[in-house]
Image: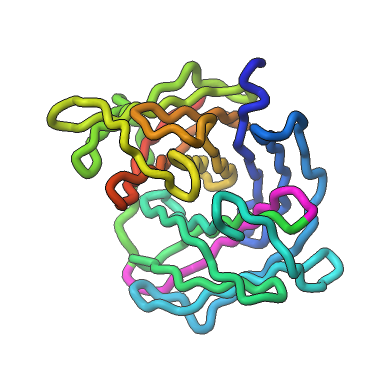
Amino acid sequence: MKYLLLILSFFTVIGLSGCESKTHVGSTHQNMNHETKEKKDTTQVSFSFNGTPESNNKVDLNIQVNSLKGKPVDQFELEHEKLMHLIIVSKDLSFFDHLHPQYKGKGLFTVIPNFPNGGEYKLFTDFIPKGSDKNVKSKLVKVTGQPAGPVSLIPDKVLTKVIDGKEITLKFDKLATDQEVKMTYTIKDAKTKKEINDLQPYLGAVGHVVAISGDTNTYLHVHPMNEKSSGPVAEFMTSFPKKGLYKIWGQFKQNGNVFIVPFIVDVP
């Protein structure tokens, strides 16, 4: 269990109704020698659009964070340079976006998402109210417009991909549920095979990883074990709460550009 104090992940199990989710969060931080677990929600969140969400027609998304008593939450803690992280995925997980809504005060965050096609999308927002643990809420939304063709989730046979001239390999020390799993990314130049060691901090760390189950009911946002690393290796620790297909997006930055690396794995 030597990696236990290095886990920087959390997971959320949510229902299929598309409503705000109930969240169960477990997180352990490198600079804190204890584990905190949120046993109940501390906030309630509403999602609303200033108009009908439509593909390629941008409208404001409002995210209102209130206490359980209905009063606006005024103060939030920075986590990796932002007050709120918003992950948007299509229901088939073929589309992924990571946004940072702007805080307007009195618990209100706004952002203009881009939905490339019509269909169903899942929104995941995570934030830390001051003096509280991490909160994660979700919403299933329907977007009008021409839908894209369905994309099947098929596990990658080889966990190596070339993205933006970089060869990225993902390795697991093991794949299992309810156990600590170490994920290691190795990044090289695709042509020369030379290891890349000039990765730049992305949101204050060498990289970020988001993993979502095939049914979109499980959400993992994982931070690196060594945030100061600049490559070629980036290591993450997490735990998959249930078996099945997961799509995993790694996000890294080099030469001022963020690149996203998706993999699909089947966790036994």
- The residue sitting at the left extreme is 191
Tell whether 60 sits left or right of 127.
left
Count the labels in the image: 0
| Residue 117 at x, y percent in the picture | 34, 66
Q: Horizontal and vertical percent for residue 64?
A: 67, 71
**Measuring 86% from the left and 68% from the top, which residue is drawn there?**
69
The image quadrant of residue 12 is top right
Tell me the residue at 32%/47% (across/down). 259
Which residue ends up furthest to the right in the rendered image?
A: 69
Q: Position of residue 159 (x, y in %)?
A: 32, 27
Q: In the rendered view, tell whether residue 235 sits above or below residue 111.
A: above
Colouring: rainbow
Q: Where does the N terminus fall, quadrant-wise?
A: top right
Residue 197 visible to an observer of this rendering:
yes
- Magenta residues, as a range? 131-146
Q: Is residue 132 covered in magenta?
A: yes
Quadrant of the rendered structure where residue 108 is? bottom right
Q: Locate residue 141, reporting x and y percent.
A: 53, 66
Asked whether residue 242 is in view, the answer is no
Using the image as rendered, state which of residue 206 and residue 244 is in the foreground: 206
Taking the image as shown, residue 166 lies to the left or right of residue 23, namely: left
Question: Is 195 on the left-hand or right-hand side of 180?
Answer: left
Rendered residue at 30%/44% (across/down):
254
Residue at 55% in and 49% down: 80
Q: Nearer the viewer, residue 44 or 208?
A: 208
**From the viewer's perspective, is residue 10 above or below residue 94?**
above
Q: Is residue 239 magenta?
A: no
9 and 220: which is toward the camera? 9
Up the image or down, 5 lies above or below 82; here it is above
